[in-house]
């Protein structure tokens, strides 16, 4: 079954966009820490899962050493998020196949609201939000 993916542009640098995303996810009870292990995880270019020390997580993200992470609702419900810094901001890919359809719709709604309210004046003529199945 194809995975639903939301792509959203946050018109800011990675070091400011990621904390914004973390705060949005927290409103839905999602945490960057796995509730079963208490650890923050990322995937490297070789496809190996790595743990990140909480004290170093934002430094590693800001420095460009980390390009993705998982956000957890429960030990078995998670959202994988990757990002790419571009000239016009930070483009997020939010993989929603690890959570219920209701939670996925709620998250897409949060990003839609942010695009139309918080960031509307900061966007130029570009695509800022797409939803696809991959």
Image (cartoon, rainbow, N blue to C red):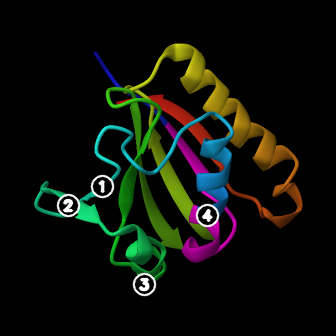
C-alpha separation, residue under disc 2 versus residue under disc 3: 17 Å
Disc 4 crowd rating (10 Å Cα; few below 14, some 14-19, many 20+) is few
Q: Earlier in the sequence, mark 2 or mark 4?
A: 4
C-alpha separation, residue under disc 3 versus residue under disc 4: 14 Å
Identify the element where label 3 is drawn.
loop
Q: Earlier in the sequence, mark 3 or mark 1?
A: 1
Q: Is residue 102 left or right of residue 71?
A: right
Q: Which mark is residue 50?
A: 2
Asked whether disc 1 touches disc 2, contact meaning CB atoms under 8 Å apart, the reply is yes
Visible in this render: residue 31? yes
Q: Residue at x 17, y 64 (%)?
A: 45
Q: Residue at x 66, y 53 (%)?
A: 23
Which quarter of the rendering shows the N terminus? top left
Of tags 2 and 3, which is closer to the observer? 2
Q: Which mark is residue 63?
A: 3
The verdict on residue 56 being magenta is no
From what the image shows, is residue 58 above or below residue 21?
below
Q: Which residue is mark 4?
A: 19
Disc 2 crowd rating (10 Å Cα; few below 14, some 14-19, many 20+) is few
Q: Is residue 9 left or right of residue 75?
A: right
From what the image shows, is residue 127 above or below residue 2?
below
Please state which of residues 105 and 23 is positioned toward the viewer in this rendering. Answer: 23
Q: Is residue 43 left or right of residue 6?
A: left
């Amino acid at each position: 079954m194809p995975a639903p993916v939301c792509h959203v542009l946050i018109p800011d640098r990675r070091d400011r966009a990621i904390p914004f995303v973390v705060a949005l996810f927290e409103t839905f009870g999602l945490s960057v820490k796995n509730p079963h292990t208490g650890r923050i995880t990322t995937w490297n270019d070789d496809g190996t899962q790595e743990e990140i020390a909480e004290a170093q997580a934002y430094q590693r993200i800001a420095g460009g050493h980390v390009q993705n992470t998982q956000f957890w609702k429960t030990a078995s419900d998670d959202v994988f998020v990757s990002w790419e810094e571009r000239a016009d901001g930070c483009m997020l890919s939010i993989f929603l196949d690890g959570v219920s359809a209701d939670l996925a719709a709620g998250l897409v709604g949060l990003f839609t609201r942010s695009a139309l309210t918080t960031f509307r004046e900061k966007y130029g003529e570009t695509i800022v939000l797409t939803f696809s199945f991959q």
